[in-house]
Amino acid sequence: MIVQAIMGAVSGVRVVGKLTAALLTVAIGTACGAKSGESTVAEPVDAATAQSGQDGIDLLVQPGTPCPGAVHADAIKIAAVSESPVYLPASGADEVTEAWRCGDTPVFMFGDIQLSFENGWKDVPIPEKLQDLADDYGGSVQNVQGLSAWVVAASPNDGVLMVKDGTAIRLIADGDVPIKDLVDLAEGLDLTRAVNA
């Protein structure tokens, strides 16, 4: 997602979809050093413009698509080099179908669901920020394992965003994946023990 935002900003391409824009709002603000009260919003455009880009190159990275320059490895190895705590289901990495790292962000695939962990959220007021996202972009704030989580079923992507100890836990999937599947995976994460602790 951060790669999308940077590439979009460089070429002037704006990102399609309320969920994508909202997730980028938070990711860009965190990655680019915006303070908790500031935000950077990607404006939605029509699908034809976003798919082709202004220069004819498709710049959007869809859920499940590794970023340019991704480093692929075994899930436990990806988790081990992450600065962010990484939480997997109690079964460990057995359910992970693919894993890679985009910069400092570890990414794990569970079939069609992408799970990532991002540092930099310790000063973000939770649940207020999540409620702001729900108010602005739809969805709702729900309780997932005792944490506030922004849950949104939208097009083109479904998403769950929750924060534990200053780390964002982000689950996204194409809109045709039932939101219940994302919530179930979030509920199944073992948040009592980071696999890289």
Image: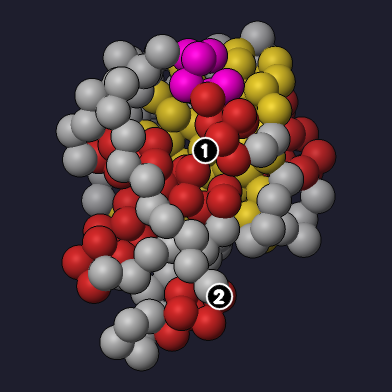
Is residue 178 visible in the rendered structure shown here? Answer: yes
The image quarter containing residue 15 is bottom left
Instruction: Evaluate whether residue 75 shows in this view.
Output: no
Residue beneath the point at 30% across and 14% down: 123
Q: Closer to the camera, 187 or 88?
A: 187
Mark in front: 2 vs 1: 2
Q: Quadrant of the C terminus?
A: top left
Q: Which residue is mark 1?
A: 170
Mark 2 is surrounded, within 10 Å at the Cα level, by few (under 14), some (14 to 19) or many (20 or more) other residues, namely few
* Image: magenta residue range: 126-131
Image location (x, y in percent) of residue 79? 39, 38
Q: Residue at x 59, y 40 (%)?
A: 137
Residue that sits furthest to the bottom in the current view: 56
Circle 2 sits on which residue? 47
Which amino acid does the dot numbered 1 rest on?
A: Arg
Left or right side of 148 for 177: right
Q: Give how far across and how far down residue 107 sits, in percent.
A: 45, 48
Left or right of 3, for residue 91? right
Q: What residue is shown at x 53% (from left), y 73% (from top)?
A: 46
For this rendering, which residue is in front, 49 or 58? 49
For the residues marked 2 and 1, what is the alpha-carbon distance in whole angstroms?
Answer: 24 Å
Q: Quadrant of residue 25?
A: top left
- Residue 100, image x, y percentages: 40, 55
The residue at the point 65 percent across, 9 percent down is 146
In this rendering, is residue 60 above or below 138?
below
Horizontal and vertical percent for residue 132?
Answer: 52, 25
Residue 196 is covered by the magenta coloring = no
Task: Give the residue type at disc 2.
Answer: Ala
Tag 2's secondary structure? Answer: helix
For label 1, the SS is strand
- In this view, the residue in front, 87 or 55, is 55
